[in-house]
Image: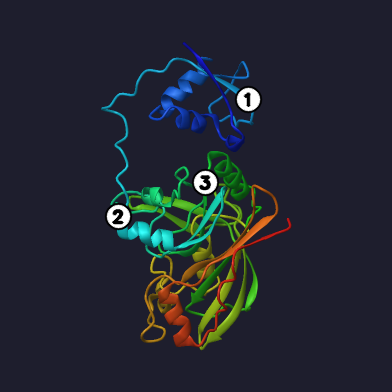
């Protein structure tokens, strides 16, 4: 017999397919698509597509569903490693009923992939704090540290994901670069394209006439320098994969430790610029300002990771400590 469920307030703007997976765990995407295509799932009595976004109070009719096949059902999640769980809990910068913010450590992938067994997504049960498992709404590269936002309900996840898509979130990164940009501040306006290969993808600059490429904009300014090594503040105005790393190479200022994108003539990025500097990637998501689901804006800052603290100390850069998280008027 069909069941009719009402969309809750905290499920606002959630896609129907994701809503269904929440209420019918184990239901594959192919089955959801078929249920929508044949009209077996309806919202307020109407046929809908799987990507339809829901509003509080809407009624969703669900037909009787077969029990999931245990042979095809995803395996249960393993509990996170206790040491990783403790490290993530200590990395929490801000928490309320809707949002949780971490200072992600460098070297931790956000999601799994080939050869990746330990990642943030697999350890999110450690960040429940008595509520639902939090949800990812954006990404940082494996070797990039800093501010990472998680949603604590499905509805908040949908709202935050829309904010990231709509570019209403202000991001500030700090980077140590192997050469100083000339001029010391400005805007990088360079199209990028994603090249897929056997070992994954790579982002490359593209011609302005390339129809397969996407616009990418980054504001930058030099905050300090020691010889040819600089401390840059980077403000991405778009959100392309590896945008900051490729843009810094394009202006002749590769990020220290970026062995993936630095060119052979920019070997300072390999850590050899000054003896003793860490060869890890020196890119840190310093701050985020985002619309809070309950109104106003939330501003969160994150202190530098240990290897960048050591580099700053060696170079004589003086970074102010992160200010406490704060809510400000929109």
Picture coordinates of residue 106, whole percent (x, y): 41, 65
Relative to 97, is 283 above or below?
below
What colouring does the structure picture have? rainbow
For the residue labelled by badge 2, is the local secondary structure a helix, a strand or a loop?
Answer: loop
- Looking at the image, the residue that sits furthest to the front is 130
- Looking at the image, the residue that sits furthest to the left is 71
Q: Earlier in the sequence, mark 2 or mark 1?
A: 1
Front-most of 149 and 222? 149
Give the labeled residue for mark 3.
152
Picture coordinates of residue 296, whole percent (x, y): 70, 54
Relative to 63, is 242 above or below?
below
For the residue labelled by badge 1, is the local secondary structure a helix, a strand or a loop?
Answer: loop
Q: CA distance from mark 1 to mark 3?
A: 22 Å
Residue at 42%, 59% (x, y): give it: 89
**Horizontal relation, residue 281 to residue 248: left or right:** left
For residue 171, say whether it is visible.
no
Mark 3 nearby-residue class (10 Å; few <14, some 14–19, many ≥20): many
For residue 99, say whether it is visible.
yes
Residue at 44%, 44% (x, y): give it: 133
User: Residue 58 has which mark?
Assistant: 1
Give the labeled residue for mark 2.
81
Residue at 59%, 63% (x, y): give it: 300
Picture coordinates of residue 67, whole percent (x, y): 35, 20
Mark 2 nearby-residue class (10 Å; few <14, some 14–19, many ≥20): few
């Amino acid at each position: 017999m069909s069941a009719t469920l009402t969309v809750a307030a905290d499920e606002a703007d959630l896609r129907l397919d994701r809503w269904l997976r929440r209420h019918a765990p184990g239901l594959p995407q192919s089955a959801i698509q078929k249920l929508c295509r044949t009209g077996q799932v309806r919202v307020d009595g109407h046929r809908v597509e799987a990507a339809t976004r829901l509003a509080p109070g809407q009624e969703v009719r669900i037909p009787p569903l077969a029990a999931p096949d245990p042979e095809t059902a995803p395996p249960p999640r393993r509990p996170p490693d206790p040491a990783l769980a403790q490290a993530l809990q200590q990395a929490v910068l801000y928490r309320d009923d809707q949002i949780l913010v971490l200072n992600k450590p460098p070297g931790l992938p956000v999601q799994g992939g080939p050869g990746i067994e330990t990642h943030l997504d697999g350890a999110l049960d450690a960040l429940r704090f008595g509520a639902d498992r939090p949800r990812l709404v954006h990404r940082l590269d494996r070797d990039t540290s800093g501010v990472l936002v998680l949603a604590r309900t499905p509805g908040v996840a949908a709202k935050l994901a829309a904010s990231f898509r709509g570019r209403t979130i202000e991001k500030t990164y700090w980077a140590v670069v192997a050469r100083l940009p000339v001029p010391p501040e400005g805007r990088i306006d360079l199209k990028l394209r994603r090249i897929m290969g056997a070992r994954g993808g790579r982002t490359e600059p593209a011609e302005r006439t390339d129809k397969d490429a996407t616009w990418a904009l980054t504001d930058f300014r030099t905050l300090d320098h020691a010889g040819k090594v600089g401390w840059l503040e980077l403000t991405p105005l778009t959100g392309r994969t590896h945008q900051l790393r490729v843009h810094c190479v394009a202006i002749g200022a590769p990020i220290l430790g970026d062995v993936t994108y630095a060119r052979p003539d920019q070997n300072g990025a390999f850590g050899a610029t000054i003896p003793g500097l860490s060869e890890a990637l020196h890119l840190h998501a310093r701050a985020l300002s985002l619309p809070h689901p309950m109104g106003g804006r939330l501003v969160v800052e994150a202190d530098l990771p240990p290897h960048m603290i050591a580099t700053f100390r060696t170079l004589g850069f003086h970074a102010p400590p992160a200010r406490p998280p704060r809510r400000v008027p929109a």
